[in-house]
Image (cartoon, rainbow, N blue to C red):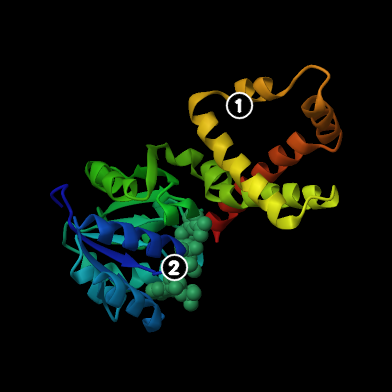
Amino acid sequence: MNGSAKKVGIIGAGKIGGSLLVRLADSGLYELAVSDVHAERLEEYADGYGIRAVGSNAELAEDSELIVVAVKPWDVGTVLKEIYPVVEDTQKAVTSVAAGVPISAIEKGLPPGTAVLRVMPNVCASVGLGSAVITANETGKKMLPVVKDIFGHVGDVIELPERLFDAATALHGSGPAYVALFADALVQAGVREGIPRDVARRLVNETIQGTAVLLKERSPHQVRDEVMTPGGTTAAAFVAMEKAGFVGAIYDGISAATEQARSLGEQ
Ligand SMILES: NC(=O)c1ccc[n+]([C@@H]2O[C@H](COP(=O)([O-])OP(=O)(O)OC[C@H]3O[C@@H](n4cnc5c(N)ncnc54)[C@H](OP(=O)(O)O)[C@@H]3O)[C@@H](O)[C@H]2O)c1
């Protein structure tokens, strides 16, 4: 592969694969193809974005320089079996976004020497504000800039050693769900205090959005200190939240998710 792959095939037109397809199509920089076990899902991309819908994963791999495997972790093995003969004796590169599946497992399912990259994105990719970590095997290293560019269309991409991928999966891969849980808890708490639900939701959404912008400029501690007047309401809330184990619960949650990502790789 020449390091400027423009023919990109995506296997799995789900949440991650679909987000990537839409943004890459908008960029007009790539020749895109997509395959999925659900033919009806492909029509949306063919009709809406002019993306080539392909009947089989092998056929998709045949026509792609870079193949992105965007199926659930337990479906990766089947997909690799299907594309193996097409990838053999070529310069095609394979990128997986599957949580927990290590490069070593992907290499085992592909011809020796295949360029393999691993990316862990998150669902914020669907609004172009995703964050992703990326790594590659030795052969795949020359493809890192190309694949970074591709995922750069859906958000921020950071190189990270593979040993930290399970923790990153727990942190930012699952992250949007934690923020949504926190948002929901805040809305319910506001409702409990008598604020109309739609008003509470609006206040919470804007607070999260504004805080995200502040956090780009300042550390979490700075933002906390700016809000927390000595003897004030925020300080009272912090004491109560801490007594209920708020921070401890977050450590435990990330630890459980990291362990779960690890166990997915062992299946
Ligand atoms: N969603 C997230 O927030 C997130 C974040 C980071 C990483 N990831 C990773 O990204 C990958 C995709 O996740 P997702 O949430 O986008 O999944 P998804 O929405 O379920 O999309 C996967 C798509 O691939 C299809 N598929 C299954 N087996 C296939 C096969 N053999 N050939 C072609 N298509 C096949 C699925 O069909 P069925 O529905 O019938 O299975 C589905 O349409 C996962 O490995 C996940 O770990 C997801």
Is the residue 201 above or below the residue 160 in the image? below
Residue 43 x, y percent position in the rendering: 33, 80
Q: Which residue is mark 1?
A: 220
**Residue 26, position as x, y percentages in the image:** 27, 59
Q: Residue at x 28, y 48 (%)?
A: 147
In this rendering, is residue 127 above or below 157?
Answer: below
Rounded to the nearest angstrom, the CA distance separating label 1 from label 2 is: 33 Å
- Residue 158 or 153: which is nearer the viewer? 153
Residue identifier under label 2: 14
Q: Which mark is residue 262?
A: none
Give above or below for 186 relative to 98.
above
Indicate the amino acid at tag 2: Gly
The quarter of the picture where residue 23 lies is bottom left
Question: Percent position (x, y) of residue 39?
Answer: 37, 82
Q: Between residue 72 and residue 181, name the one nearer to us.
A: 181
- Crowding at mark 2 (Cα within 10 Å: few <14, some 14-19, many 20+): some
Q: Quadrant of residue 57?
A: bottom left
Task: Check mark 2 vs ligand 1: CB closer than 8 Å? yes or no.
Answer: yes
Mark nearer the viewer, 1 or 2: 1
Q: How many marks on residues?
A: 2
Q: Are marks 1 and 2 in contact (CB under 8 Å)?
A: no
Q: For the C terminus, give its image quadrant.
A: bottom right
Residue 256 visible, this angle:
no
Residue 77 visible to an observer of this rendering? yes
Q: Is residue 141 left or right of residue 212?
A: left
> What secondary structure is marked by label 2?
loop
Amino acid type, mark 1: Pro
Viewer-proximal residue among 247 and 139: 247
